[in-house]
Image (tube, rainbow, N blue to C red):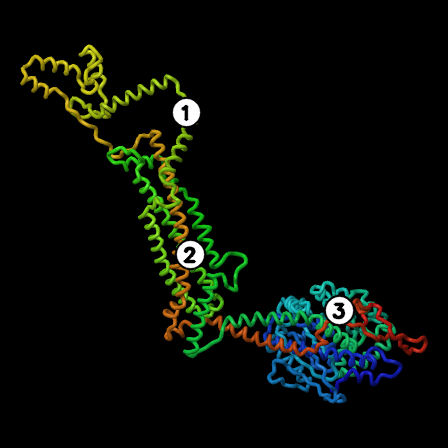
């Protein structure tokens, strides 16, 4: 069936100047819009074909026009009228069940050195197969729909992509979406309405998508399903174009003038009214060409539509869609190029992280060696603070090691008081133990040596703990190296972790041994000649002043009674002490604490007649009565008998056994207080010297034996332990997940490269976006749509029915179409 071009529509139209589908309008659309569309729309079409290879994985949204409408609203008739051929499935039930991406591409006509041939190409068919029979195109759409959506009137979101090449079309890209339905029919699922609305919103919610909302004229525009769903995605109606279909079946006496003028539901881009073929026309195989002529005659015969030339007819709709889409594409081009460029860089980086596959032994060896070398470089960079992935939110790598040394280890040692666990009694006990059986004339050196060694030994545990902290940090650093690169080889990652873990433990052992030696060296030689050591003279002077100052505030005169009692207590204690060494009971067992019985104390003065006794014997010996009798008997008896009696009657002297644990007295003299203070000053002075030595030597030992040693020798250890040909295949075995990701990123990278090269094909004038001011179209602010330079309105001359043309008349809704 022959098609009808825009020029052919105007060829059969009589004068005076025709209505919207006239030669002047169509020719202007063809001559002005086509060059614009030919510069950018084919490029976008090519990009759509390229990104279609990725399917739903594509994150790049391209400019397009989505056709939205309720079921049987006339969407298919509008699309066929734009093409000029019958090619879409038809029927009483839902016909469009998969999104149809329709790309209209204008070719050169025979008169312009081209061909008048028209054909279609499906993207899913191989080798760009051309189909010249449009009935076959319809059958292919039906077959492809049933292939995925089934025969039960269900829907599928997977696209069908169709290109129509014809000299009779303008460059436009449209997406025909399933019609909105309310009630499931046949085998349709119960949620068919929700499925279709979700599918429609997935397209029109993108800012890059223009919305062509199709509504039949015989329905209430305010309740239009198409406009309602369009307003959900485009609340301000900035990118919605309204199409009023079936104007010829409105009730007699009514018209759509107010609808087309935007007085009922305003749209920024306005409305276009069209007349569709009815079901009878389709059944009688009435051609689209004939339908366009009938549409033209309809508008000529309806005075109500005079003056709305820019909003009536299929040719005007084609022109409007072409111009708006071109300007929309031009407005989005800078952002589109930026998004494709960024996606290309990110995908290339991701694909590079997955690496290449090599199966030869030499290739595997080179790959493994490359991994080991890069790992060691990354390890050193993290330690030295030269990593490219340096964090700005927290300390990492070598900075954490420095923090452990200075803010944890050194600070903790400086907060330790060397005398915090030593009481004055401990120090006094040590001093008395150091004097031996003699009383010391000066403060002995031995207690200082013993006590300072004990305090130095306390530095061993925090020093070893510091080494363990550094070991843990090195393990963390090793895990951070090349995390993404080594994900593809889990076996290699595990082996490397094992090797470096063992190697770090080997470095920890000499570090801990060196730390122990440093502590032992400090303990083995107490260098009292150190220039920073306080020395004896200064220590004695400082101790005397401290003791003197501490005693002055506590010197308070005591009452006389207390003094007397104290003297009595001292005298009594002296007597008890004397008795403790010499006293014993009559049975020969030493009394506890050497205390004489009360009866013996009373009997002594009674027997002697006096409390005094020479040699103090009454205070030493017990039994004064027996002693008097013994003395008298001793004087009266012969000498031999007297000696025998004396040996029998005199009591033997027993000493009290010392207790198992001896402690010094609770009170100490001023001299002892001075000795304690001297010892404390010496301890603190020398401990500070040792502490500074430890703070300096321990980090050096750790850095030498652990940190720097692993950094220097790690590569050699890797080569020795892992670079073995019999291990190549096992260690370089990657997971299936990585293989899938590599394939996916490779495909995405290829698509993005194609898209980037396609954008380079754009002419310079198409890449520049003109920032014009507000024009009468009201579109340039949002879509940069140019104002039409020549617009016509048609008015009926009184009594003749002829129409006169007035140049420059604008549509009263201000949209310029």
Image depth: mark 1 or mark 3 in front = 1
Q: Is the C-beta separation of discs 1 and 2 under 8 Å?
A: no
Q: Which residue is mark 1?
A: 555
- Image coords of residue 252 (percent x, y): 84, 71
- Neighbor class of circle 2 (other Cα within 10 Å; few <14, some 14-19, many 20+) is many
Pick the quarter of the image with the N terminus.
bottom right
In this rendered view, identify the residue nearer to me: 514 or 609: 514
Q: Earlier in the sequence, mark 1 or mark 3?
A: 1
Q: CA distance from mark 3 to mark 2?
A: 61 Å
Q: Secondary structure at mark 2?
A: helix
For the residue labelled by badge 1, is the local secondary structure a helix, a strand or a loop?
loop
For the residues marked 1 and 3, what is the alpha-carbon distance in whole angstroms? 97 Å
Q: Which residue is mark 2?
A: 470
Residue 688 location, quadrant:
top left
> Residue at image x 17%, y 16%?
624
Name the one closer to the observer, 30 or 762: 762
Q: Earlier in the sequence, mark 1 or mark 2?
A: 2
Task: Tell me residue 135's x, y (percent).
Answer: 68, 84
**Residue placed at 41% from the left, 44% from the top?**
416
Pick whichever of labels 3 and 2 is earlier in the sequence: 2
Badge 3 element:
loop
């Amino acid at each position: 069936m022959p098609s009808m071009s825009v020029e052919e529509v105007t060829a059969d139209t009589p004068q005076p100047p025709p209505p919207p589908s006239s030669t002047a309008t169509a020719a202007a659309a063809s001559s002005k819009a086509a060059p614009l569309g030919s510069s950018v729309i084919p490029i976008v079409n090519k990009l759509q074909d390229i990104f279609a290879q990725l399917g739903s994985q594509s994150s790049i949204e391209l400019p397009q026009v989505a056709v939205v409408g309720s079921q049987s609203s006339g969407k298919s008739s509008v699309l066929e009228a734009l093409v000029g051929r019958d090619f879409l499935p038809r029927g009483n039930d839902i016909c469009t069940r998969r999104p149809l991406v329709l790309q209209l591409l204008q070719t050169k006509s025979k008169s312009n050195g081209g061909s008048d041939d028209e054909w279609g190409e499906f993207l899913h068919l191989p080798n760009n197969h051309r189909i010249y029979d449009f009935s076959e195109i319809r059958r292919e759409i039906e077959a492809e729909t049933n292939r995925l959506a089934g025969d039960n009137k269900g829907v599928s979101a997977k696209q069908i992509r169709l290109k129509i090449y014809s000299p009779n079309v303008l460059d436009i890209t449209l997406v025909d979406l399933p019609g909105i339905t309310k009630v499931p029919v046949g085998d349709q699922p119960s949620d068919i309405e929700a499925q279709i609305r979700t599918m429609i919103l997935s397209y029109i919610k993108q800012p890059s998508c223009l919305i062509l909302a199709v509504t039949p004229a015989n329905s209430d525009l305010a309740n239009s399903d198409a406009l309602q769903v369009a307003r959900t995605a485009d609340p301000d109606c900035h990118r919605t174009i309204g199409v009023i279909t079936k104007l010829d079946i409105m009730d007699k006496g009514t018209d759509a003038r107010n609808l087309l003028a935007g007085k009922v539901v305003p749209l920024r881009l306005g409305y276009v009214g069209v007349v569709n073929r009815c079901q009878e026309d389709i059944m009688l195989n009435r051609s689209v060409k004939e339908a366009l002529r009938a549409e033209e005659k309809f508008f000529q015969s309806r005075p109500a539509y005079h003056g709305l030339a820019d909003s009536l007819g299929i040719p005007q709709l084609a022109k409007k869609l072409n111009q708006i889409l071109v300007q929309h594409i031009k407005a989005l081009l800078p952002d589109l190029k930026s998004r494709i460029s960024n996606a290309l860089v990110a995908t290339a980086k991701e694909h590079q992280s997955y690496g290449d596959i090599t199966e030869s032994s030499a290739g595997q060896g080179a790959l493994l060696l490359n991994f080991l070398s890069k790992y060691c470089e990354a390890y050193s960079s993290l330690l030295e603070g030269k990593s490219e992935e340096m964090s700005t939110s927290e300390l990492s790598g070598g900075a954490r090691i420095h923090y452990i040394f200075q803010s944890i280890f050194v600070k903790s040692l400086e907060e330790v008081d060397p005398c915090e666990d030593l009481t004055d009694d401990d120090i006094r006990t040590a001093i008395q133990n150091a004097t031996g059986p003699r009383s010391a004339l000066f403060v002995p050196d031995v207690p200082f040596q013993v006590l300072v060694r004990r305090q130095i030994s306390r530095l061993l545990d925090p020093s070893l703990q510091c080494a363990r902290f550094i070991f843990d940090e090195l393990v963390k650093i090793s895990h951070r190296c090349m995390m993404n690169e080594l994900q593809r080889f889990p076996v290699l990652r595990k082996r490397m972790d094992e090797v470096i873990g063992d190697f770090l433990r080997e470095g920890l052992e000499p570090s801990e041994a060196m730390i122990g030696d440093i502590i032992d060296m400090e303990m083995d030689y107490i260098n009292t000649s150190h220039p920073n050591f306080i020395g004896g003279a200064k220590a004695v002077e400082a101790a005397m002043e401290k003791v003197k100052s501490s005693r002055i505030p506590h010197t308070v005169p005591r009452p006389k009674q207390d003094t007397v009692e104290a003297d009595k207590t001292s005298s009594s204690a002296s007597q008890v002490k004397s008795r403790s060494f010499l006293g014993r009971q009559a049975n020969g067992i030493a009394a506890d604490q050497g205390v004489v019985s009360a009866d013996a104390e009373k009997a002594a003065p009674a027997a002697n007649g006096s409390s005094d006794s020479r040699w103090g014997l009454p205070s030493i010996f017990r039994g004064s009565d027996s002693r008097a009798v013994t003395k008298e008997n001793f004087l009266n008896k012969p000498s031999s008998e007297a000696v025998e009696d004396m040996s029998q009657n005199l009591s033997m002297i027993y000493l009290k056994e010392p207790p198992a644990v001896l402690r010094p007295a609770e009170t100490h003299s001023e001299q002892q207080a001075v000795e304690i203070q001297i010892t404390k000053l010496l301890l603190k002075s020398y401990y500070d010297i040792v502490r500074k030595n430890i703070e300096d030597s321990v980090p050096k030992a750790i850095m030498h034996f652990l940190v720097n040693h692993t950094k220097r020798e790690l590569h050699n250890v890797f080569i020795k332990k892992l670079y073995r040909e019999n291990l190549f295949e096992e260690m370089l075995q990657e997971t299936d997940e990585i293989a899938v990701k590599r394939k996916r990123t490779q495909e995405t990278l290829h698509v993005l490269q194609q898209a980037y090269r396609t954008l380079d094909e754009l002419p310079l004038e198409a890449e520049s976006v003109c920032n014009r001011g507000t024009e009468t179209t009201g579109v340039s602010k949002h879509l940069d749509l140019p104002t039409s330079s020549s617009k016509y309105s048609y008015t009926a001359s009184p009594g003749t029915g002829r129409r006169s043309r007035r140049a420059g008349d604008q549509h009263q809704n201000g949209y310029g179409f």
